[in-house]
Amino acid sequence: MITPRAPRIPASLPISAGRTFALRRGRAQWSSVFVGILALLALPVVLPPFWVHLVNGCLIAVIGAVALNLLTGNARLVSLGQAAFLGIGAFAAGLVQRAYNVPFPMALGCAALAGGLVGYVVAQLSLRLRALYVAVTTLVLHFAVVTLFSFVQAVFLDSSGILLPLPSLGVLELRTPTQWYYLLLAITALVVLGALNLLRSFIGRRWIAVGEHDVAAEALGVPVKQAKLSAFTATSAVTALAGALSAYYVGTVSFESYTFGLAIAYLAMIIVGGIGSVLGSVLGAMFITLLPYVLDQLFLVADLKFRPNILAGIHQIVFGTLIVAFLLFEPRGLAEIWRRMRLSASNWPFQYRSASRVAR
Amino acid sequence: MKLKLALAMLPAIAAAGLMLSGASAQQKVQKIGYIADLSGPMQDNYGPIVEGFEFYTKELNARGGIDGAQVQVLVRDDQLDATRASSLALELATSEAVNSIWGMSQTRTHLAVYQTAARNRIPAVAMFSGIKEVLPPNPLPFAYSAGHVFEVAGEVSGKLAAKMMNGKGKAICNSIEAPGGVAACQYAEGAAQAGGLQTGTVLFPPTVTEFGAIAQRMLAMEPTIVIAHAGSGQNVGLIKALRGAGFNGPILMGSHGLNEAPLINALQGVGSLDKLQIVSRFASPDSPGKELDAIRAAAAKYGKTTPIATTTIMGWALATLMEASLRQCGYPCAGDKLNAVLENIKVDMGALMGGPIRFSPTDHYGTSWWRVYQYNAGNKKFEPASEWLEASSTPTLRKQ
Amino acid sequence: MEARASASWDQNWGKLGLLPLPAPRGGERGRSNLPPIHPSISPDCALVAAFALTVVASWGIYALLGLGIVLVYRTSRILNIAGGEIAMFIGYVGALAVADGLPFPIAVALAIAAAMALGVAIFWLAIRRVMGEPPHVGLILTVGIGTILNGLMIVLFGGGMVAIPTGLPAFTTIGAVRLPTPDVVAAVGAWLCVAIIALAYRLTNLGLQMRAVAERVMLSAQRGLNVDRTLALSWMIGILAIGLAGILHGERALIALSASVIGVSALIACLIGGMDSIKGVVLAALIVALTENFTALYLDPRYVLIAPVVILLLILIVRPWGLFGTVEELRRV
C-alpha cells in the first residue's frame, strides 16, 4: 500500500497570521524585491544625469502622493489643499533657514512640524462637516495660505523668493542629482514602507473604516474624531516634508509656485494611479511627473508642425482627459491595470484558474 | 491590448527622441540655451522676444557665425512654472552642455533659473524684466539682466512723472500685488515725492480684470497723473476704467513687455490714447536707425507678416549682447570663461537702446537709458517724446 | 553716481522737453475732470451712482454664475467647480465672433448655442456616468473638465486678454447721471437672465420637472419622468447661465485665462448662500459683490479676492450649510 505523500505546501500559502500579513511571501517574491533594490541603487550609474533629475522629481512627488492617498483614498477626506501644505512646508523650511541658518535636517523637521500643526487645525475645523464641506474647507485653506505667503513675501521678504543654500548632511553636500537621488530614495522608501505598514496596523484600519462609513465605524467603537485628526495631521506633516525637500532641491521658494493646478496635479496622481493603494500613489506620481516631458519628446520625435505655443494647452488637455477618463472608466487606476496584467501573466496561457489551484 | 501596446511603446519613443535630439554636428558649434514662456497665457509678450533673438541668430549664422562657429539656440518652454524652468535649465546645462542661458520668462522663474545656472557654473542673462538680485552692490554670481528691473523702472517713472507735472500735483502708482510690482511702486512714489509731488499707491491682484471699483478708488485719491506698472493686459482694462470713471489726466505706462499694436487696437474705441505715455528702455518699432532697419529687413526676410513690436527689438538687443560676449569669449567657450567675459563687458547698442549695456563685477545690470513715447493720433504710432534719460543701477529714492 | 544722474536729467530735460500735453479740462484735481452733468446733481452723487452701478453689475454676474452652479447641484448633486473656466470659454467664443465682424447680438446668440451644446456634451459624456457616486467623485470630475477647457482655450483661442465690445457709445445718460455703458449692459443683461431663468424654474413645466428630480429622484422616475432628459436639460441651462455670465463679464471687463477667478467668487457665493438654494445664491452674490467692491474702494484692492474667502470661513464655522441651504445634521464626532 502506497502512503500518499502530503502535498508540498508552497511557501507563499498564507497558513499563519504572520504569513498572511507579511509584505512578501515565498522565495520568488523576496528575490524579486532583492533584484528591485539592486536596480534602484544602480540606477544613477546607468541613466544620464538629467534622467536622474527626473527620477528625483518623481520621488518627491511619490512622497506627496502617498500622503494624499492615505488621506483622500483611505480615510476619504477629500483634500484640495495639497498645494497649500506643500507651500507651508517649503516656506517653513525657507524662513527658518533664512532666519536662523539651521542645518538641513532640522529645517525638514520644522517643515513637518508646521505642516502637522496646520493640518491639526484644519482637521478640527472640518471634523463636524460632511465630505463635500471638507473639500471646500481645504479649498479655503489653499486661498488663505497662498495669500498669506504672498503678503509675507512682498512685505517682509521684499524679494521674488527665498534663496536656499546647498543642503548638507554633515560633511556630505547635496550638489548633484545623483547625491540627491540616494537621499530621496531613502526617504521615499521610508515613507512608502511606513504607509504600507500603517495600512496594515490598527491606525490604518481605523482610517479605512472611517473612510468607508464613519457612522458604522463609530458604532463599531472606532474613535472617529481621533482617526480623522490623526489622518489629517500625519498626512499634512508628510506633505509639508515633501514641500521642503522640493524647495531645497530647486533652491528657491516663491509663493507663485503653489497654484491650484499643483493641487489638481496631486489629485490626478492618486486618481490615475489608483485611489486607496500605495502602489497606485507610486505609479500615479511617476506617470504625472514624467507626462510633460514624455509629451514634449513625442512632439519632438513626431516633428509635428504645430505652433509651439499650443503645447501648454495640449498638456492641460491630456491632463484633464486623464483625470476624467480614469475617474469614469478605471477608478482603481494604474494599480488595477497592473494587477490585471500581473494576473493574466501568471495565468497564461490560460484565461483563468480553476478553483482547485492555490490562489496567489 | 492596443492601449497596452501603445503604453509600452512610449518609453521606446521617448528614448529615441532623446537620442535624436542630441544632434551631432561636424562643424564648430556654439550652443546656447533660451528659456521662455512660449505656450502659456503670456505667449504674446514672450513670443516676439524669441522671434527677435532668432532673427538675429539666423542672420549671424548666414554671415558665417562667430569666427566660423555657428550659433545654435536651444529654445525651451517653461510655461511660467519655476520648477519646470529650473528643470529645463538643468537639462540645458547637463544634457545639452550649453554655455549660457538667455531670455527667461516672468520674474517668478528667475531666481530658480539663476540658482540652477550658478550651481552648474553657466551665466544666465534675463531680458524681459529683471529682479533686483542683479543690482549692485552684491549681485548674484552668474546672474545678469538686460531688461527692465522693476526697482529702476519704478524710480525712472516717478522722476518722469514729477518732471511732467512740474513738481505740482499728485501721482498715483498702480501695479500688481507681486514683489516686483510692489517695489516698482515704492520707488516710483519715492522718486515722485523727491520731485515734489504728493503720491499714493493702489495695488491689485494679477487676476483682477474688472477695474470699476478700483478706478473709482483711484479717482477718490484725486490724482493728476497715473503711473501704471501692471501687465499690459491689465493696463488696458485699467485705462478703460479710469477714462470711464472720468479721469482725463496723463497716464504713464511702464513698458514691461508691451506690444503696441494690441494696445492701440484695444484703446481706440474708448478714445483714450491721447494722453498715454510709455517709458521704455528700448527704441519703439517705428524709430529710425540702422539696427532697426536691419530688424525690419530680417523680419520681412523670414516671413513675419505682422509689424514688429518693442519686444522684437528686445530680443534683437539681447542677441547683440550674446554675439558680443561669445565673440570675446572665443572658441571653445565654457561657462566660467563666458561669465568672466560678461562680468566686464560693454556693448554698444546703437539706436536700439539709449546707451551701451555695461556689466561689472559688482553690477550685473549697468546704467540704463530710458525714453518716453507719446501717442500721435495723426499717424497712429507711439513716437519718442524725450531724449534718452540716464538712470543709475542703484535706485535710492525708495518711499519709506 | 546719483548726483551725476540727476544733473544729466536736468540737462536732458531742459534741452528737449516732452511734446506739449493737451491741457486738462476742469481743474488740476482728477475728480473735477468729470464731464459736466446736470447742475442739480453734485459730483459726489454721480460717483455714488457709478459705484452702485458697479456693485449691481457685479452682483448680477455673480448671481447668474452662481445660479448656474446651484441649478446643476440641485438636480444632480454635483458641485461644479469649473464655473470660471466654462464662463471664460464661452466668453472667448463670443469675443471671437465679435472680432470676426459679427454684431454683438448675433455673437451672443452664437455663444448661447455653444453654451447649450457644451452643457449637453459635458452631461452626456461625463456626468451621466457618475450619477449616484459619492459627491467627491463629481467634484473631481468637474475639476478635470475645467482643466480640459483651460487647455482648449489655449489651443483654440490663444489665452490672451480680449474684450467683447458692444458697439454702443461709451457713456449713457440715465436721467441726469452719465454712466459707463458696459456696466449698464452687464447689469441689465445679468438681471434679465437671472429673472428669466428663476421664473422659468418656478413657473414652467420643465422647471417643475427639474424641481421634482431635485427633491426625489426615485419618486419622479416612478411617476414617469425621464430623469436622464431632465438632468441633461438642467445641465444645459446651468452651463447656459454660466456662459452668459462669462459673456457679460467680457462685455464689461476682459476675458482672460486668469479671469476664471470670477468662478471662484461665484462658488464662494454659492457656498455662503447654500449650495441648493436659489434665494441663497442671489443674496450671497450681493454679499460677495459688496464685500469685493467695498474692499477695493475703502480698504485695499490687494485683498479684493481674499475678502469673500474670510466670510466663507466664518460661515463654515458657524453655519456650514449656508444661509438658506438645506440644514444638514452635523455629525457629532
Image (spheres, coloured by chain):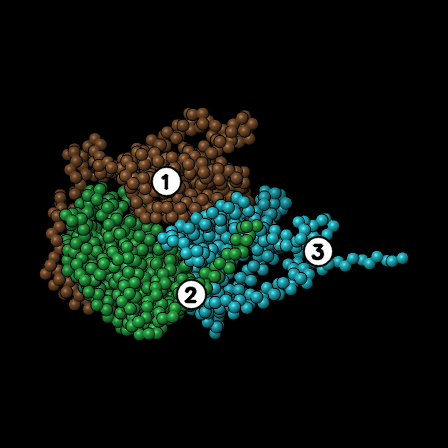
- Judging depth in this view, the residue of C101 and C223 nearest the camera is C101
Give the residue type that dot 1 points to: Ile
What is the distance, in whole Å, between disc 2 and disc 3 at their CAs? 52 Å
Label 3: few (<14), some or many (≥20) within 10 Å? some
- From the image, tell me which residue sits under label 2: B22
Three-letter residue code for mark 3: Pro
**Alpha-carbon neighbours of circle 2 within 10 Å: few (<14), some, or many (≥20)?**
few
Q: Which residue is mark 1?
A: C90
Side of B87 where A217 appears, left or right = right
Per the model, the C-alpha gap separating discs 2 and 1 is: 43 Å
Pointers 2 and 1 within a single chain? no
Q: Residue at x 49, y 49 (%)?
A: A322
**Which residue occupies 35% across, 74% down?**
B332
Look at chain B in the picture and name its colour.
green
The chain whose colour is brown is C
User: Amino acid under label 2?
Assistant: Gly
Q: CA distance from mark 1 to mark 3?
A: 59 Å
